[in-house]
Image (tube, rainbow, N blue to C red):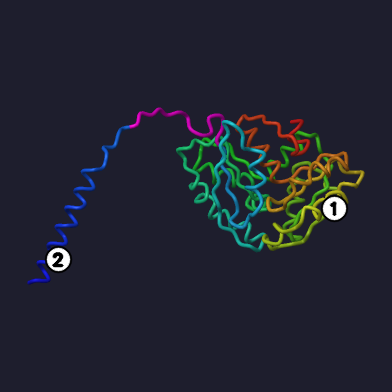
């Protein structure tokens, strides 16, 4: 009985203390506010990034972000090993990844950020899967964007550089040939591990671009893969080769901006962003 009385008195003291504290708190004043169109008053762009990609978000930030333009990311599960099978399997998760970009944002353009994945799944299929969730958004991917970029610059004869194993590289070459491009040189780092691809140095990429691009029968160079850190070497390579260099992340950013009706010119990101 004594223990119960002590507990009751302690509870009364606690409740009394809380009441004193609440009585001494100031009332909450209502703040007036207005609303506007939020971020992305000029354009809202969505990007579906591979789970293993370490590069594209860093490179995109300087090309896309500007007053009035908002960029939002989602991630899609993918295997670390890049094979035709693992790339094609991503189509199963593409609608779910697209749905993580809220439909209420009314995206102007959405990109699926995998060059080889879009090649294996099919560019039209990628667009259809994303449009199931975002029917009013324009859709792109790096292989479609690179073809649009090369057309914009008048390039027909291309030196192709990839990081992929032969099966994936040959599939990409066939895709480009079918689109009317003549691939005169093909070079690859021959890696199937996406973690390794993201760690290939910019110096290695530059050497490969200069070697492949030195072919006098090519008009420009296309460096495929969103994981490759290509953006930082584009202007140097173009200056030495006197030819345009197109890269997956650069072309996708350019294409998404154009689809969103934003003809932004970005110095230091290659001829594509300076002249078209």
The answer to whether residue 20 is left or right of residue 257 is left
Q: Which residue lies at the image location 78% right of the left edge and 59% below the top edge? A: 189
Q: Secondary structure at mark 2?
A: helix
| Residue at 63%, 41% in the rendered image | 140
Residue designated by label 1? 207
Q: Earlier in the sequence, mark 2 or mark 1?
A: 2
Callout 2 environment at 10 Å: few (<14), some (14 to 19), or many (20+)? few
What is the magenta range?
A: 31-44
Viewer-proximal residue among 186 and 61? 61
Q: Quadrant location of the N terminus?
A: bottom left
Label 1: few (<14), some (14–19) or many (≥20) C-alpha neighbours in 10 Å? few
Q: Nearer the viewer, residue 40 or 244?
A: 40
**In this view, the mark in front (2 or 1):** 2
Report x, y in % for residue 36.
45, 28
Left-right relation of 218 to 123: right
Residue 141 is left or right of residue 220, and the answer is left
Q: Is residue 33 above or below residue 156?
A: above
Residue 44 percent location from the top left of the image: 55, 36
Disc 1, SS: helix
Asked whether 85 or 12 is in front, the reply is 12
Label 2 sits on residue: 7
């Amino acid at each position: 009985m004594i223990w119960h009385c002590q507990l009751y008195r302690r509870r009364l003291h606690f409740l009394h203390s809380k009441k004193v504290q609440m009585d001494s708190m100031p009332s909450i004043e209502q703040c007036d506010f207005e609303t506007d169109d939020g971020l992305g008053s000029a354009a809202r762009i969505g990007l579906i990034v591979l789970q293993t990609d370490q590069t594209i978000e860093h490179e995109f930030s300087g090309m896309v972000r500007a007053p009035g333009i908002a960029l939002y990311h989602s991630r899609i599960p993918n295997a670390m090993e890049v094979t035709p099978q693992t790339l094609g399997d991503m189509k199963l998760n593409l609608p779910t990844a697209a749905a993580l970009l809220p439909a209420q944002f009314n995206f102007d353009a959405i990109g699926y950020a995998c060059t080889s994945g879009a090649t294996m799944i099919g560019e039209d299929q990628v667009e259809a899967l994303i449009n199931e969730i975002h029917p009013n958004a324009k859709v792109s991917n790096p292989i479609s964007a690179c073809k649009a970029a090369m057309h914009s610059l008048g390039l027909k004869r291309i030196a192709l550089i990839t990081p992929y194993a032969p099966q994936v590289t040959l599939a990409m070459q066939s895709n480009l040939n079918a689109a009317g491009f003549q691939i005169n040189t093909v070079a690859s780092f021959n890696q199937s591990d996406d973690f390794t691809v993201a760690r290939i140095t910019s110096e290695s990429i530059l050497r490969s671009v200069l070697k492949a691009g030195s072919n006098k029968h090519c008009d420009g160079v296309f460096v495929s893969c969103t994981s490759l850190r290509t953006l930082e070497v584009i202007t140097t390579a173009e200056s030495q080769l006197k030819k345009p260099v197109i890269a997956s992340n650069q072309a996708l950013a350019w294409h998404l901006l154009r689809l969103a009706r934003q003809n932004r010119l970005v110095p230091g990101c290659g001829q594509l962003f300076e002249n078209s």
